[in-house]
Amino acid sequence: MANIILVFLEQRNGLLKKASLEAAKFASDLAGKLSFDVEAVSVGDEINNLQEIGGYGIKKVTHKKHSSLADYSTSAYTKIVSDFIAEIDADIVVFSNTALGKDLAPHLSVKMDSGIVMDAVECNIENGEIQLVRPEYGSKALTTVKITSPKKVITIRPNVFNPGNPNQDAPEIVINELTETDLSTKTIEIKKSEGKLDVAEAEIIVSGGRGMKGPEHFELIEKLADVLGAATGSSRAVVDAGWRPHSEQVGQTGKTVSPTLYVAVGISGAIQHLAGMRSSKYIVAINKDKDAPIFQVADYGIAGDAFEVLPVLIEELKKVKED
Amino acid sequence: MKIAVCVSHVPDTATKVNIGSDGKSIDPNGVTYVVNPYDEFAIEEALKTKEKLGGEVVVISLGGENNKESIRKALAMGVDSGVLLKDDNYRDSLAVAKALADEINNQNAELVFFGKQSVDHDNSIVGQLTAELLGFNSVSVVVSFDLTDNKITAEREIEGGKEVVETSLPAVITAQKGLNEPRYASLKGIMAAKRKTIEEKPALPAENFTEVVIMKKPTPKKAGKIIGNDAGAVPELVRLLKEEAKVI
């Protein structure tokens, strides 16, 4: 046992993601509790804000650099990170549970022959053991799990562990220029969804359901999202009806979200939808049917016609924003 | 080409979850089990690939006797044969993947489809674990798939967009909703499925590296307030969002 925690820092377009800062703070806090050392590794081409990581308790970061690594490659990233884990003999490896983290972490757990816990939302030390709480069954259950193998891989849910304000510490940055990479799986292009925020990463989400009566009325949802700086989401019913893309679906067969504010419009609140958004900090529901289950989880509800309420709400919010 | 598709047998998403008497798993009483919704996209893609390139599709499932229902569903949709890897005990993802990888090797499959996630334990890793154990290439959370002349081009969903990924066989693909429209089993398919054999064998033993300490239901959210029943309630809503919730 080298007593080392390694945190993987994800970059996109040469910048560390916010989720990586959360993972860094999580890893350094965990290291503090266990009296372990902590360090970080990143993979990519140039990263412009690597020094920021020092403020979150990371003293040393190794950047594995190659011009072919700007975009994600399962094969290359697996090889590079697993070699580095072996080199420093890391005991625990931490990732953020992003699209990239979810793909990469399991490959490394096989390389380490270690137990893996995904999507942790809480971490406690009980009798020197790490216990992780994670949602299952589309967040209808919360399971506390421990890893029994000596090596451990953990991913943490984005937007849950608050990294707090950084201090002014600067990390030691080691740039490791690589000469070759294994690109047997290779990203050849990234197709961006037209300038929209993704529900999985948004602080505010405005979702529409069957009560919007047709795809043409989602313009109202989009306008409300615009004025709030929010992402647009959808219920399963409207995705299955082909009104909205699946990437917007919130719920058990879509995305589980926990934004600061979730606005549900014309959504009755099927159990699988509620499971996917109930951990939002504040929930607003607008629905004609006052008995709809959505009102059982909503902090603030308006039991009225969305077509009447939304235009007024959009205007009122515009006024607030102008002040 | 031999194509494998791995399916799990899970509680329907409309299920209300209650915790079982062991305090570590759900109470199965009154729960309807179905083929994992994402696995239906995996089955459909396996069948489409066979229709395009020829070959044979085998469905593999690990679990108890009841998993045969999900295997039968895949057979009714058009899959050629089924294997049940029997194990009535709880396995974690890595222990599941080890048994699946062993069987995929036995089957000499070159292309393997999974659903991107089972809607019970929600780990979304069994496909990737199996790929790494087998030394196969892998692409997860796939919404578009093409295999031409041994070259795979797949689109995987990421935050705010898609990555277009190129790789080659042998490969594991995990299916996301949007990849295709799963076909319904025809009456003929259902009848034919009854004649297809399901091979049963014990799953390769594997140790669990994780252990459940306790399972709980999330604390119920306390009911909020209905402010009004028309647009007249909007100013009060805006005030609450600004002054009480402080989110705008």
Image (cartoon, coloured by chain):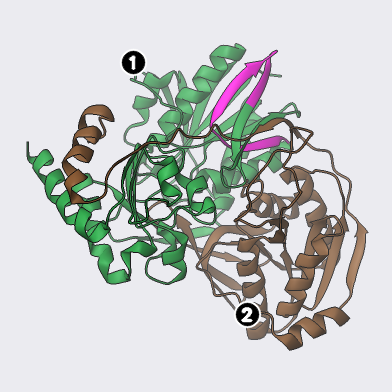
Colour assigned to chain B in the rendering is brown
- Locate the N terminus of chain B by quadrant: bottom right
Q: Which mark is residue B48?
A: 2
Confirm whether residue A201 shows in the render. yes
Give SS at disc 1: loop
Q: Quadrant of residue B17?
A: top right
Based on the picture, tell me whether residue A37 belongs to the magenta stretch: no
Label 1 sits on residue: A167
**B226 sits left or right of B234 in the view:** right
Q: At which x and y percent is residue B219?
A: 54, 31
Instruction: Residue at 33% x, 56% y: name it.
Output: A288
Instruction: Residue at 72% x, 35% y: name it.
Output: A114
Give the letter of the green chain.
A
Q: At which x and y percent is residue A269?
A: 45, 52
Which numbered disc, 2 or 1, marks the residue closer to the eye? 2
Q: At which x and y percent is residue B15?
A: 63, 52
**A284 sits left or right of B9 in the view:** left
- Badge 2 and badge 1 both on one subunit: no
Chain ID, mark 2:
B
Instruction: Residue at 73% x, 72% y: name it.
Output: B74
Instruction: Residue at 60% x, 55% y: name it.
Output: B13
* Mark 2 residue type: Lys
